[in-house]
Image: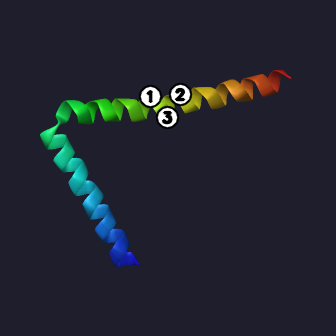
Amino acid sequence: MKLIKRIVVVLVIAFAAFYLITRPQDAANAVQGAVGAVWGAGVAVVDFLTALAQG
């Protein structure tokens, strides 16, 4: 099982490096989209907790 995980991790890293080298603008857009999604989820959780605290 460890070998399979290691192979998958290496393949993901290799794909990410290939994508970054061959399409840097698209890679930057993908990272910006992922960061934006995480940020939006964080804001939604804070809004939920604020509304919950206010009753």
Q: Circles 2 and 1: CB distance less than 8 Å?
A: yes
Residue 6, how many percent across, how many down?
32, 70
Helix, strand or loop under label 2: helix
What amino acid does circle 1 point to? Gly
Helix, strand or loop under label 1: helix
Question: Dot 1 surroundings within 10 Å: few (below 14), some, or many (20 or more)?
Answer: few
**Which residue is at 65% across, 28% downward?**
46
* Number of numbered discs on residues: 3
Placement of the C terminus among the 4 image quadrants: top right
Q: Which residue is mark 1?
A: 36
Q: Nearer the viewer, residue 50 or 22?
A: 22
Residue 12, how many percent across, how many down?
29, 56
Q: Which residue is mark 2?
A: 40
Q: Circles 2 and 3: CB distance less than 8 Å?
A: yes
**Which residue is at 23% across, 53% downward?**
15
What amino acid does circle 2 point to? Gly
Kindly identify which numbered label has been placed on residue 15. none
Q: Which residue is mark 3?
A: 38
Q: Circles 1 and 3: CB distance less than 8 Å?
A: yes
